[in-house]
Image (cartoon, grey):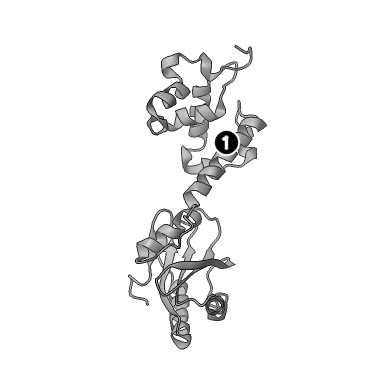
Amino acid sequence: MSSQTIMIKDVPKEDRPRERLLKMGASHLSNQELLAILLGSGTREESVMSLSNRVLMHFEGFKLLRDATIEELVAIKGIGIAKGVLLLSAIELGKRMNQYKPDEKYIIRSPDDGADYIMEEMRTLKQEHFVVLFLNTKNQVIHRQTIFIGSLNASIVHPREVYREAVKRSAASIIVAHNHPSGDPSPSQEDIQVTKRLVESGKMIGIELLDHLIIGDRKFVSLKEKGYL
């Protein structure tokens, strides 16, 4: 045993998270145990289990850890550059796995399908992103594009920018979406006005706007369901 660190192997065998993972599977481990496996060791004064618990408490569980920076991590006693980089890598892998979509085209049959397609990617964004999903005649997503980043404004979200790409992609219809960084997806008057402009423009060129989704934190509002389309 090192004079400076307490390793997982120095924890009593029945309490070792690695042993428990091999015996019971990763799904049976607590967040603290999974984090302890990543950290690998504690310090001379603190066990790795205690360190992992302190990290979780510092970030209020996974709530803030998801967006942690290397500076925030290494500021915690017991977390050096090596541990911080390892944690950031694991967090980024988790994000990418959540956002991964199979190669086959995704079909949108309902507002829930549309929200599921973009929720994980958009719900934690710190700025508003206006995104367009371009669909074919089978309601399969053939392209996704962020049109602009910033506060939603009718003068900025011009139908020309939205439908130019739709024509280029030979889209049969589109779904637009934007996020509310506050986490509350309640539509504003600006959201409603933008939607109505896009609906009218779509009718003129024969590309239907199927829905406008407003993404909050794990919840959304469909303006189609609200009767604005």
Give the image location of residue 204, x and y in percent: 46, 88
Amino acid at dot 1: Leu
The residue most toward the front is 104
- Quadrant where the N terminus sits is top right
* Neighbours of disc 1 within 10 Å: few (<14), some (14-19), many (20+): many
- Say if residue 212 shows up in the picture: yes
Residue under the image location 44 percent in, 57 percent down: 119
The residue most toward the bottom is 204
Give the image location of residue 86, x and y in percent: 60, 34
Circle 1 sits in a helix, a strand or a loop, which is it?
helix
Of 21 and 88, nearer the camera is: 21
| Residue 130 falls left or right of residue 215 | right
Residue under the image location 47 percent in, 81 percent down: 197
Count the labels in the image.
1
Residue under the image location 47 percent in, 57 percent down: 182
Give the image location of residue 157, x and y in percent: 54, 75
The picture quadrant where one finds residue 4 is top right
Vertical relation: 118 (above or below) 210: above
| Residue 188 falls left or right of residue 146 | left
Give the image location of residue 16, x and y in percent: 46, 20
- Say if residue 185 shows up in the picture: no
- Quadrant where the C terminus sits is bottom left
Vertical relation: 83 (above or below) 111: above
Residue matched to label 1:
87
